[in-house]
Amino acid sequence: MTAASTSTLPAFCEGIQHFGQLPAEFAQYAQTPAIAANQAKVAAASNPTAVFQTLLAADALRYLTLKMAATKQSGHPGGFASIADGIAALVMLGYKNLITEVGHHAPGFYSTVFLDRSLEQMGIETVAQLCDRFRETHGLLGHLSGQIPGLLNPAGPLGQGQHFAMAAARLHPEQLFPVTIGDGGLGEPYIMSSMAHFHTAYPQATNFLPILVWNGFSQEHHSMVSTQSNEAMVTYWRGNGFKNVVLVDAKDYDDAGQSGAYVDSTAFSLPQRMAFTQAVLEAVEQTASAALGGTLSVLIIKQLKGAGVHKRGAQSHNLYAGDTVDKDYIAAALQSRALAPEAWNLVRTNFERANGGPAVKTVVTEFELPLSDLGTLPLNEFAVGTEHRQVATTAMGALAAYVGQQDPHFIVTNADGNAASGINNINQALKILHPTPDDTYFQGPQGQVYEPLSEDACAGLAAAQALMGARSLWCSYESFAINGLPVWQTVTQAMAELRRPAPSTVCLFTAGALEQGRNGWTHQRPEIENYFAAMMRNGNVFPLFPTDANSIQVCYDWALKTRNKGVTITASKSPLPIRTTFEQTQTALAKGAIALQTTPGSHTVVFAVIGDMMLIPVIDAARELAEQGIGSKIVAVVSPRRLYRPSDVAWQSCSQPDGDFLSDADFKALFDGDALIGVTGGASAMLEPLMLRSTLPRDIMAWKRGETTANANQLFALNNLTADRLSARAKALIH
């Protein structure tokens, strides 16, 4: 171990504590960069120069990953260490559109885009700055987010990354999108099924490449697939439609006598390390070529978790307090991976040249995807009146159909069927994507309606497509959508941080709990609105509750024009009266709510109502009160996020900030009276803004629980949301 002369030390190496001696092979294989000037990749995967320099790159990635985490005594070095050879090979072969399913691999991915100079856009130019900014505000988050230059996707919950790779592959058929998948994450039930459905729907989009990080361990124990034989693992992938399955097992190259099925390649002799690295390079080259050439492929790299860092197995997963760079086993690991300054400079040059330049200047997410011009949406304004009943979801479906006809990238996703949600007109116009043409079901191989029976797959592809820059619409029963929300939330949070504009991720949630009486509580889960109510404070989440078929059209038109938001539209699939004009909803979207009806009387009870069907018993309650001489005002809350105070919401931190909130004067004009009752057939949390701002005697009447009932009125009664209960509560508040 040597201390480098400051005269020979590349500037970016400031902060590196340990430098190694130049190996004897350096003179033979490292006199010039393996990626030549004006080239984007190595000339040949089997060339010893390329192999040796890829090995150096893998050690550089391991060093930086461990150094970064140990500087903060926090982070996850072990998982990435077992795939460092694979990531180095991808970069050296010119593939930088890198995606991961594993948020714990974040420090390794940060190391990758540091080496290729992408992080200089964040002011990170040295190793010292890399470590200083790790796990710090406005720095490098503990898990991948949407704000890191050169990285394509956020990563937190397991089982999501494949969605980003598949969406990108569909939108960019000429590019390869490798996605690393941990063998711990492989236990998530949706990964394989989502890829199988995508391949059936889009058989030509094979240009995503799953790379299984098969290291034998999860976070705190052996992974559940650690007992599989190589043959069983290959058979598993082939049985799920992958025609080309390539497995590189480090055990086959071990000359260090390591026990167990999983071994550490950094313990091999240098010739065997080079043999293993060459095998990885050739496997990446072969699977990448096959994937780009139309064959569904997977690369499996089997190597012990923690290879080349401080510990092995699950113990390598996480660092804890006291795990500093000076801790004996961490210092020893850093010293064993240490490179000479000349080697660091060589790795940096190769990474910068790969793919034609730093990832921040070359990967697809650094550029806005051109969007088709939609022109003016064909809005259809229905006449106002209780006799003019229309299905709101059907009215929006007509607009979604139009969008798809104008925009070939646009997709609609639904797990439980559009026809069941009153939007069969979308199927009729855009067709369900299916390899079997059948006009009876409006399906065919060129359809734009993606229908896997998995909300995760629906939400995942729709949200990922928005993140990658294209329009989409996720449609779901309110009761089932909860299964797709983790990936939608991940993307929506990333949207708030994204460094470029992208279409908002838009959802339509139909079949509200009140419509699902005879299905029982399994179809009555409006507590999902609590999820969105909490997310409203993020700053870019807008739950919308249109009042009718006119209102929903204006809401969708608005959502299509927004950027970097998460917009949920919740509406009934039942024919309901038309209560508002287009202009009224435009006002409600700007102010949050509109007054629908004012009745004079001795007192004024304000009903602030969320939902379309919920208006029915409220209007009846207002009539009962009027018969007793008590006045009322019914206010339809369409966009509750607008009703917060600006200080309640983290809007200023959003990359596309929206700081429009209802002023105090306008709030008073809308909601002033003698008492205020917030009413919703969903979760009470949606009415929080009203409860925070109003000083009137007030209460909330909201959904409590579901039950099997014959009709909506019985569900109203079960939850004390009937006209007589509403009027009784109003009288109690004013007396």
Image: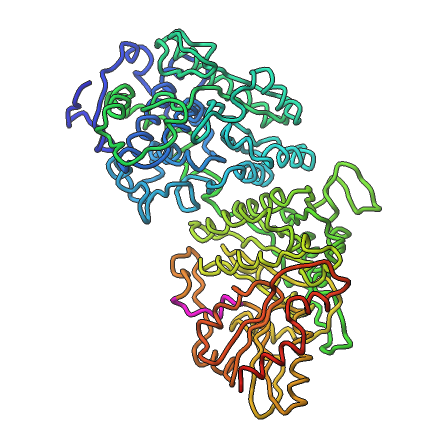
Query: Is 721 displayed left or right of 80 in the figure?
Result: right
Quadrant housing residue 292:
top right
Q: Which residue is depicted at the point 48% across and 78% down?
A: 667
Q: Is residue 25 left or right of residue 293?
A: left
In the rendering, at what x and y percent does residue 277 appear? 42, 16
- Whether 562 is drawn above or below 175: the answer is below
For residue 193, side relative to residue 362 (left or right): right
Asked whether residue 153 is drawn in magenta, I would say: no
x and y, in percent, of residue 531 in the image: 53, 56
Give the main secondary structure of the magenta stretch: helix
Q: Which residue lies at the image location 65% right of the left edge and 65% below the top edge?
A: 552
Can you say whether 139 is above or below 8 in the image? Answer: below
Q: Where's residue 458, x and y in %?
A: 63, 45
Magenta-drawn segment? 640-647
Task: Name the image quarter holding residue 257.
Answer: top left
**Is 646 in the magenta?**
yes
Q: Nearer the viewer, residue 265 or 483?
A: 483
Name which residue lies at 46% across and 77% down: 694
Q: Position of residue 80 (x, y in %)?
A: 41, 28
Q: Is residue 22 above or below residue 714?
A: above
Viewport quadrant of the N terminus? top left
Left or right: residue 81 versus residue 18 is: right
Asked whether 407 or 81 is in front, the reply is: 81
